[in-house]
Image (cartoon, rainbow, N blue to C red):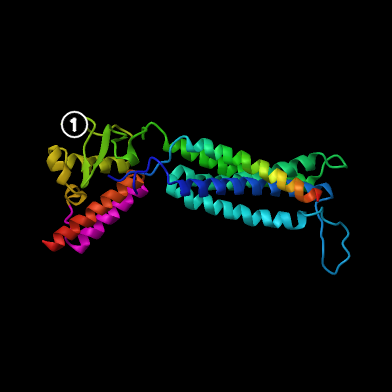
Amino acid sequence: MPDRARPRRIDLVAYLLGVLVLSGSLTVLWLSMRAVMDIGGMCASGGPFVVAVQCPEGVEWLLPLSIFTGLAGVGLIAWFGGRIGPGFAAVAALAWPALFLSLGWNFLEYGLAAPGGWDLSWLLCGVLFLAMGGIPLIVAIRGLRGSRSPRRPSGGGDHGGPMVRPGGVSVRTVPGGVTFTTASSGTSRAPDAGVSEQHVELARLLRQVQGATAAEAAEITVGEATGVDASGDDGLVDQLERLARLKQQGALGELEYRQAKQAVIDAAAKGGAA
Amino acid sequence: MIEQARGPRWAWLLVLAAVTAGIYAGWWLFGAVTAA
């Protein structure tokens, strides 16, 4: 992915249009729902039947239309936001809690202020909607906080800088391959007690390449680091499985995993060509 | 080096402005349609 400090104007305009359409659609949906709830929560219009409660003017087409335009807005945000930056595309995910929390508010408000005092069915809907909107939001916020924990300082990890791991081990990625080093360069340092198994395994791999100079380390591929011959099909598969396991266990980040995987494949291709 | 694409920080102000404009536009549209 190219480094893009300034987004293309067309991407930004289309993205902002998506945000505008989505927030406008949610507003129309929210207001339409209140208009229907004002007349008892159910209405109809048109058709060959005798309609007991006519829908407010325009709501019968405005409400379904807002759902489709809202989906279109989410699509614009996800597509063009991805071109601007990952955080911008993630705004599309906020549509879900925004929808359920705002409609849940309507249910709760009308459930508590019903003509007979309060309405249990609307209150139940309100609680359900708030849970559907609130729980994913809380989980997402906790996930975001987790990804910004001190283990992954800003400027590290996915941006090519050193990533500090428990046990005093850091991982640095460089162009042209994957190099591993430790935070305490030149000294063999055992991982702290209590670190998880995957970190011990990663630390062991790092120690294998610790003696290399920076220039040598730049040439060291994951295959050499792991001591597995990548030239054969079996070695390649073993390494890929090993990397996948490390990623699954959380010892390798997404970017590190992709780079390491590419390095393994390159090493295998080089070995096959030789 | 692989870099994650990152939009500028000022773009978030535009996002907030777009949200505000969207809410206003939705409110206006609903009022205009139901009042007609």
- Report whether A144 appears left or right of A39: left
Mark 1 Cα shell of 10 Å, populated few (<14), some (14-19), many (≥20): few
Q: Secondary structure at mark 1?
A: loop
* Residue A93 visible: no
- Could you tell me what secondary structure mostly forms the magenta stretch? helix
- Report whether A108 appears left or right of A239: right
Residue at the image position 18 percent from the left and 31 percent from the top:
A185
Which kind of residue does numbered mark 1 sit on? Answer: Ser
- Report whether A6 appears left or right of A165: right
Q: Position of residue B26 (x, y in %)?
A: 68, 46
Label 1 marks which chain's residue? Answer: A
Q: Position of residue A138 (x, y in %)?
A: 56, 39
- Report whether B8 appears left or right of A33: left
Residue A241 magenta-highlighted: yes
Task: Please tell me in which quadrant of the rendered image residue A148 appears.
Answer: top left
Instruction: List the residue tagged with mark 1.
Output: A185
Task: Please tell me in which quadrant of the rendered image residue A269 appears.
Answer: bottom left
Q: Nearer the viewer, residue B3 or A271?
A: B3
Residue A185 magenta-highlighted: no
Residue at the image position 60 percent from the left and 41 percent from the top:
B19
Q: Position of residue A85 (x, y in %)?
A: 43, 44
Task: Please tell me in which quadrant of the rendered image residue A218 appears.
Answer: top left
Toward the front, the furthest residue is A9
Q: Nearer the viewer, residue B23 or A104?
A: B23
The quadrant in which the C terminus of chain A is found is: bottom left
Q: Which residues are magenta?
A: A228-249
Residue at the image position 29 percent from the left and 36 percent from the top:
A161
User: How many numbered tags mark residues here?
Assistant: 1
Toward the left, the furthest residue is A274
Q: Position of residue A208 (x, y in %)?
A: 17, 42
Q: Nearer the viewer, residue A262 or A119?
A: A262
